Image (tube, rainbow, N blue to C red):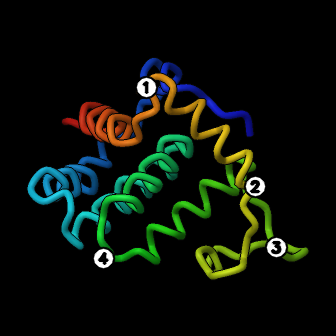
Amino acid sequence: MASRSWDYFVASWHPSKNWASTVLPAAEVLQRDPTSDAATTAWSEIAMMLGDTHASELALLVCLYAEETAPGGNAKRLHAHRELCLLDLGLARPARPGPVLLAEIGAPGLTETDATALDAWRAAQLAPFDGDLARAAQAILALVIARVQP
């Protein structure tokens, strides 16, 4: 899958307003205490919504940010979302032949990430944010909130 830019998502990405019931409570948690264990779960909710609405690029940035800033919480769930994004974007591949089952996503050793490709992808995706992952995550969160507001 070719990676899309921030400008593409700003112009073209319009998730269903039905996501508000998932996204808005998560956003409240992130605004109230962005470094709590609950923040990891909240970022996982945001990542799930982004992935489910075909915005894997944004979901991966959110996952990378959450891994750097959130202390724990449901880290397994967050890692599973990251793994799905990496596979979707062609930045990782299965470590063994055959299909990858959804129930296996996030298991250690399931995939192999192309670290060089991920670094280049990350740099390109963060260019609109002057390379700042925190700025990117906050912009993504603001976009998500704006798009699901009833």
User: Which three-letter amino acid code belongs to the residue tagged 2?
Assistant: Asp
| Location of mark 3 (residue) | 95
Residue 34 screen position, x and y as percent: 19, 57
Between disc 1 and disc 4, the foreground one is 1
Question: What residue sits right under mark 4 in the picture?
Answer: 73
Q: Earlier in the sequence, mark 2 or mark 4?
A: 4
Say what amino acid the circle numbered 3 marks: Ala
Instruction: Please give the residue where the numbered disc 1 appears in the rendered image.
Output: 130
Q: Is residue 59 left or right of residue 120?
A: left
Please tell me which residue lies in front, 30 or 8: 30
**Relative to 68, is 141 above or below?**
above
Question: Which residue sits at x=9%, y=56%?
Answer: 32
Q: Residues within 10 Å of mark 4 (few under 14, many from 20)?
A: some
Inter-mark Cα distance, 1 to 3: 33 Å
Name the mark nearer the viewer: 3 or 2. Answer: 2
Residue at 73% from the left image edge and 45% from the top image edge: 117
As measured in the structure, the alpha-carbon distance from the residue carrying label 1 to the one carrying label 4 is 29 Å
